Image (spheres, rainbow, N blue to C red):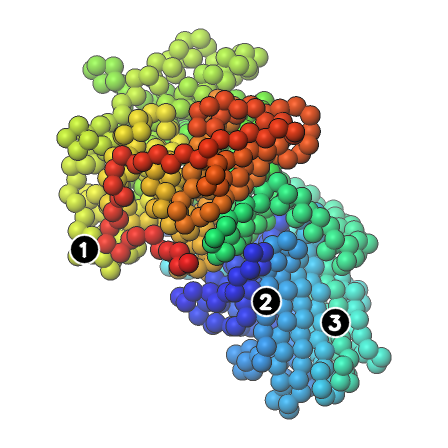
Amino acid sequence: MPTPPFDASAWQVRESALDPGARGAVESLFALANGCVGVRGTLDEAQPSSSRGTFMSGVYEYHPLSYPEGGYGHPEHGQAVIGVADGSTVRLQVDGVALDVRETPPEEHDRVLDLREGTLRRETEWRTPRGARMRLTSTRLVSLVQRSVSAIRYEVEAVDRAVQVVVRSDLVVNGTPPKVHNSDPRVAEVLERPFRARLSRRHATGGVLVHRTHGSGIGVAAAVDHAVELPDGGAVSTQGDDDQVVTTLVADLRPGERVGFVKYLCHVMSTDDPSVDLQERALAALDGARHRGWDGLLTAQRAELDEFWDGADVEVDSDPELQLAVRFDLFQLLQASACVNGAPVGAKGLTGGGYSGHTFWDVEGFVLPALALLRPLDAARLLRWRSSTLGRARERAQVLDLAGASFPWRTIDGHETSAYWPASTAAMHVNADIARAFDWYADVTGEDLTTVGGVEVLVETARAWAAMAHEDHEGVVHYRGMTGPDEYTGVVDDNVFTNLMARRNLRAAADACEAHPEHVGRLSVTAEELERWRAVAEAIHVPYDAVCGVHPSNEGFTTYREWDFEAKRDGYPVEEHFHYAKIYRRQVVKQADLVLALWWCAEEFTSEQAARDLDYYEQRTVRDSSLSACVQAVVSARVGHLDLAYQYLRESALVDLRDIQQDADGGLHLASAAGSWLAVVCGFGGLDTAGGELRLAPRLPAGLHRLAFRLRWRGHRIGVEITRSGTTVRLLDGAAGEVALRIDDAPRTVTAERPATAPLRSPRPSTPAPRQPPGRAPRAPHSP
């Protein structure tokens, strides 16, 4: 797939030419969303498109799962995000000929995703077969303020000749089936038309449709109306059926005349409410959108984004492409979470149907920590959703013959939906990753764990770890048959990342119970159980290879046969060229695993161990996952390989804008977007939050002259600026009080009147710059 053809500015992503080969990726990059509703960034006209769709968080359908061999405890059905009523299509005919950029390439084409305005603007000029010059302008937004509302302003102008224009504006259900990468025909059959009609109404300029899914029973209502602008003699009408509302404008235009509309769309959903109530909710939201009007929606959107950037902006001097990429990634975090409620954030947000819309541990591992530091209210809502699924996690633990709770590898509604257990159920680290997100939130915000259901989650995951612990004859605790973050090394004993995260989980649960004795009785936690958790945590085995002088990612990993990277340098992604029976037995790493432990469990390693471990795994990590580069950026920065960290930051931040993984057509890589910001803040900023103390260890690579970022810490907005002359930390909100922190381990205090400063340290790394496998150096090098 070609790289999307973009021009970059500090705040805008611009497409000034159409590239059919990059169409799917562009549709993902230009998607607009607010965490509740998401609309793919397709052209207005129905075709050409790669994959149209409007999605809502928490709206999915069940589908069959196929198993070549049955097995106890396998998920009974799959779950897939489905497109709801799509109102993004506007069909245009001029003198009886449909606008189709494949048949009539535009003379001018410009689309701009504006990160400050929160809009997607388009301007297209073309000539009809009869030679009439036409101009089309459209602007889309998905409201970050009114979670049900999206809108389109659409206008067609006859530039130099009289023409007849027909515009048909659609709202269609069951018209955007997902791309199904599954050979089981039953899956496509279920997902092709997932909704059945319940109610429909129409009026002269719009209507409302109410549908419910066949299997999951989710009700969705969509309402549409048009504020029409017609020249004299023009006409408007609306037709439709149970699955569509189509509003048609017909007008004869003289040169300089225009026809158009503002299209207001509102989506609501519920698993419980009757169809009539859903209809009324959608119509009420529509009334609110019309009352605010197009200009009001634009003003509210800009105000919301002004507030967001005031507390979240990152400034990168000397690298304009990286500057835009980091802001683009932050914008995607906002789009994925701003209005989400009672539903998870999927790995792709609402930008596409990739991974079937499932949420993974990536969200708690990367998205939640970033949101806690940027938008803590959004983080709290997502944590409350996760804690609301605790009952289902308890049921899953019972299926696995465990105490406590076991959260799913991939899900939408809280049930496990992965049919491949070696890379899902065996990856029990997901429980500790989720527990860490709750702990991180409490440290960053100072909020009580009980406000997000954190105590219960910590207790039940600790119970699962205690149940899985295997004690050998010497009382040493092992965890057998686990898969860590690296999916190229599956079902192993004593995965270091898993073991260290289990230790953290057990200790955090014991600490939470001691801090909240009122919950101990309610959760039936005994003193013996607390003692057991701490004892297990202390006794967990952490493998170490004294011969190689490094930690094996799991017991025996450093004795596996080496992968012949040179001979197989064209065999990427590895999983698409070699069988897992071979991959599992070699020292080849898909994504940072042991290296992730160097970040998340940094207190468990000396600085010398971290440097040697990073060097060892750099030579074996191929980054077939987008989730690796940001981790390697953080650890490289902390070890002192700042230029390597900078190159990994670029790869992570540009993974979608350059379509580095060649799969952006299925949606954006949300965890990588969050990881890119964390690479700036936790890598070059050296931020750590353990124990509720704000600590920084700023660093600056040779390729950058200045780096500045903002975050929220316990109710305060804080700005950090790193330059060659030193680091300055400011309190930005002007509020009374002070913030205590450490810079390079030296205590500092910041007030609104008195910033904290420190010289910039550049410690020498204890190892030479690591090598990567042939052909796997960072894939977005900076070209000044």
Rounded to the nearest whole Å, what is the CA distance between mark 2 and mark 3?
Answer: 18 Å
Q: Find the residue positioned furthest to the front.
A: 725
Q: Nearer the viewer, residue 96 or 615?
A: 615
Q: Looking at the image, do the residues carrying marks 2 and 3 touch, with CB atoms under 8 Å apart?
A: no
Image quadrant containing the N terminus: bottom left
Helix, strand, or loop for circle 1? loop
For marks 3 and 1 on the same chain, the one whose residue lies earlier in the sequence: 3
Amino acid at the residue labelled 1: Glu
Residue hosting label 2: 111
From the viewer's perspective, is the residue at label 2 or at label 3 nearer?
Answer: 2
Q: Is residue 531 above or below residue 617?
A: above
Q: Is 680 in front, or is 479? A: 680
Residue 444 placement (x, y as % from top left): 54, 29
Q: Earlier in the sequence, mark 2 or mark 3?
A: 2
For mark 3, give the secondary structure. strand
Residue in front for this viewpoint, 554 or 181: 554
Q: Amino acid at mark 3?
A: Gly
Mark 1 surroundings within 10 Å by alpha-carbon count, few (fewer than 14), some (14 through 19), many (20 or more): few
Which residue: 54% across, 50% down? 327
Query: Rounded to the nearest whole Å, what is the CA distance between mark 2 and mark 1?
Result: 42 Å
Q: Where residue 115 sits: x, y (%)?
A: 60, 54
First in sequence: mark 2 vs mark 1? 2
Which residue does the numbered mark 1 point to in the structure image? Answer: 566
> Is 724 on the left-hand or right-hand side of 492?
right
